[in-house]
Image (tube, rainbow, N blue to C red):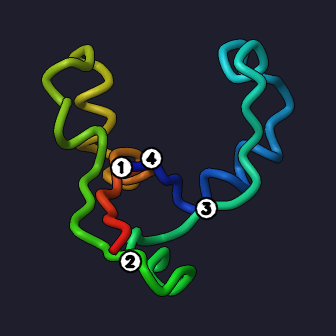
Amino acid sequence: MIEIFHPWVIKMSANRKYKDPISTRAGTLFKWGVKSGRELENWFENLEFIEEWFVVKRGLHRFPLVTRILFAVVPIMAKMNKIVHLRFA
């Protein structure tokens, strides 16, 4: 299982005028993103796509009410990152 980000999120994070303190401390650097986990099947012959789901949709109840309202008003915000289940055959 891996977490993927939509290419738009990567582009926006590269254009930010401030650095996210958590990402900076962790030393993360986002270079690329994919629109769907299915795209990863084309990268390797023995990689099989099983399923994917939006992180926010599975854990929506954990977010504060204001954030849940934001996700309802701006649905694209809830679709920025996914968990992808893959299998190496």
Viewer-nearest of labels 1 and 4?
1
**Dot 2 corresponds to which residue?**
38
What amino acid is labelled 4 in the image?
Glu
Q: Would you call the spot at circle 2 few (<14 residues within 10 Å), some (14-19), or many (20 or more)?
A: some
What amino acid is labelled 1 in the image?
Met
Q: What element carries label 2?
A: helix
**Where does the image place residue 14, in percent across and percent down from the top left?**
80, 46
Residue 27 against residue 40 in the figure, above or below: above
Viewer-nearest of labels 3 and 1?
1
Task: Give 63 or 32, whichever is nearer the viewer.
Answer: 32
Q: Are marks 3 and 4 in contact (CB under 8 Å)?
A: no
Report, in whole angstroms, how far the alpha carbon at label 3 lies from the one at label 4.
10 Å
Residue 6 against residue 15 in the figure, above or below: below
**Dot 1 corresponds to which residue?**
1
Q: Which of marks 2 and 1 is nearer the N terminus?
A: 1
**Where does the image place residue 57, in percent across and percent down from the top left?**
20, 43
**Dot 3 corresponds to which residue?**
33
